Image: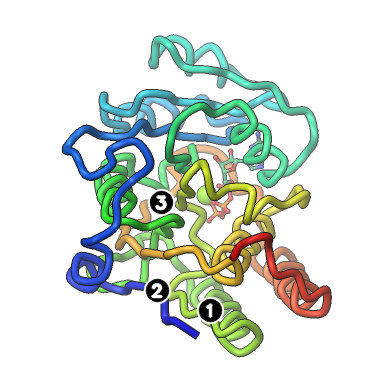
Amino acid sequence: MKRNLMKTVSEREAVLGTETSPKTNGSKAHASVTAIIPTLNEAGNLPYVLDTIPDWVEEVIVVDGRSSDDTERIARLLRPGVKVIHELTPGKGAALRAGVNAASGDYFIALDADGSMDGGHLDAFREAFENGAQYVKGSRFAVGGGSADITRLRRFGDKGICLLMLVLFGARFTDATYGYFGVRADCYDKIRLETNGFETEILFNIRAHRAGLVIAEVPCFEGQRLYGNSNLSALKDGMRIGLYVINERLRGHRGSAA
Ligand SMILES: Nc1nc2c(ncn2[C@@H]2O[C@H](COP(=O)(O)OP(=O)(O)OP(=O)(O)O)[C@@H](O)[C@H]2O)c(=O)[nH]1
Ligand SMILES: [Mg+2]
């Protein structure tokens, strides 16, 4: 099977340089980007996160609906033109799906609202798409990436899930659990999922690989959550994610790709 995971920028440039994006068709014009941001009580963090998102991002979608704080008001105040979608089903996976359903860009890129993901990396995501990637994954562990937030348990858990993905699917990712990722709009159907929880973004990686999408990793630096509490339990959600990965193998899902 073709190895379709590029670990470094230079590898990406070498391998992806010949492909074109959906609208550019080889020209210099940029295709449009939708940033999808799920939020659950992130009013304290949104000022930082929205400020990092470059002006060139055509569409910003905040998926809220379950916050009891001022998240929606702050979003509208700080990013005029922001689309706020209400999703009442609990879980980040459900929020991501709602965001994608409302998105109109050529590339969808998901990022968290807790301050751990820097919108400044969106340039590198777009570049990877424009160099031919169909699925772009942020990685804290690729050369040039890093984290101010990783614990030993989380690093161990991430390595375990990466190994599981390699052994069960032959999928070579350096970071399985960092939820900064993007997919080309016309490829989304190949990775579409109905799960609602944190497992969703991990299963996207597997489906992208199995569907034969061209995958690129972008080195990212993970900051610490600025305010509020995490909604993820490293142990409980980590085990749950592991079971979902095994179940994905047992179900033999191959996506709908060529
Ligand atoms: N709309 C919506 N957003 C959610 C839900 N659960 C989490 N989120 C958002 O999803 C993003 C990631 O959630 P976090 O709680 O930071 O979890 P995490 O980043 O996977 O884990 P940590 O590394 O512990 O922060 C954040 O922007 C949350 O606000 C939910 O049920 N609904
Ligand atoms: Mg977080």
Q: Give the mark nearer the N terminus: 1 vs 2.
A: 2
Query: Which of the 4 image quarters holds residue 131?
Result: bottom left
Cα distance between the residues tagged 3 and 2? 27 Å
Say how many tags the image has: 3
Q: Residue at x 58, y 47 (%)?
A: 188
Separation (CA) of disc 1 from disc 2: 8 Å
The residue labelled by disc 1 is 171
Q: State which tag comes first along the sequence, 1 or 3.
A: 1
- Dot 3 alpha-carbon crowd within 10 angstroms: few under 14, some 14 to 19, many 20 or more: some
- Residue that appears at 66% across and 44% down: 92
Circle 1 crowding by C-alpha within 10 Å: few under 14, some 14–19, many from 20: many
Looking at the rendered image, the disc whose residue lies closer to the viewer, 3 or 2, is 2
Q: Disc number at residue 224? A: 3
Q: Are marks 3 and 2 in contact (CB under 8 Å)?
A: no
Q: Which residue is mark 2?
A: 5
Disc 3 or 2, which lies upstream in sequence?
2
Q: Residues within 10 Å of mark 2 (few under 14, many from 20)?
A: many
